[in-house]
Image: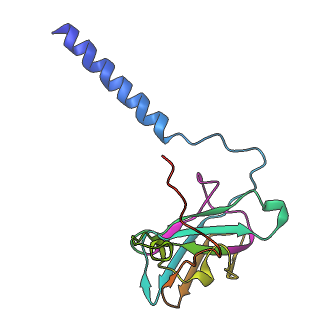
Amino acid sequence: MKCQSKWLALAMLTLVALTSACKRLPDRPDDLPQLYPVVLRVTFGGAPVEGVTVNMTPLDPALKKWKSGGQLDAEGKLTVKTGFYYEGAPSGEYRISFAKLQERWGDTLEEMQPLSLIPLKYGPQKSDLTVEVKPEKNEITLELDGGEEIVPVPKGATLGPRKG
């Protein structure tokens, strides 16, 4: 019975150690600027959208490496993180873009292009939407509009042989 107790205790300690290790963030980089809390709420056509990826790219070249963002939850809400780990964002202006794609199947390259569930005007290549993070607690609400658009097939693209 003593042997079973020792194994049980060892298993519990291992579980606690693994759980603690999974929750530990990487050390905060020395050059990471002061971060301010940002809660972003986004609706599309008046309704919250779940699973949309939000990218916030700083307009200040000095902050270029500190991109922020995350993914919207079922309520269309996001607590912004910088560098994937650190809650908040440095103060400043950001270009904000959104992406949510639905895979499709088809017989042609055009039919297989993913369907963008967010208008392409808000995508990483075209968005001119900006937000400001102030040196305080920030709550930002955005209403997106427009319809579904298919991501265009690049000109000259051909369906080549599959590798694998």
In the rendered image of this protein, does residue 28 appear above or below residue 138? above
**Viewer-nearest residue: 64 or 105:** 105
Q: Quadrant of residue 80?
A: bottom right
**Viewer-nearest residue: 123 or 131:** 123
Total marks in image: 0
Residue 152: horizontal and vertical position, in percent?
57, 79
**Viewer-nearest residue: 130 or 29:** 130
Magenta stretch containing residue 27, yes or no? no
Lateral position of residue 86 relative to residue 76, left or right: right
Does the rendering let one see residue 74? yes
Q: Quadrant of residue 122?
A: bottom right
In the rendered image of this protein, does residue 145 appear above or below residue 158? below
Residue farthest to the right, as pictured = 62
Residue farthest to the left, as pictured = 1
Name the residue rendered at 42%, 31% in the picture: 18
Q: Quadrant of residue 4?
A: top left
Magenta stretch containing residue 94, yes or no? yes
Residue 15: horizontal and vertical position, in percent?
36, 29
Name the residue rendered at 45%, 76% in the picture: 111
Image quarter of the N terminus: top left
Does the rendering let one see residue 133? no
Name the residue rendered at 48%, 83% in the picture: 43
The region drawn magenta spans 76-95
Lateral position of residue 140 relative to residue 12, left or right: right
Residue 121: horizontal and vertical position, in percent?
62, 84
Residue 155: horizontal and vertical position, in percent?
65, 76
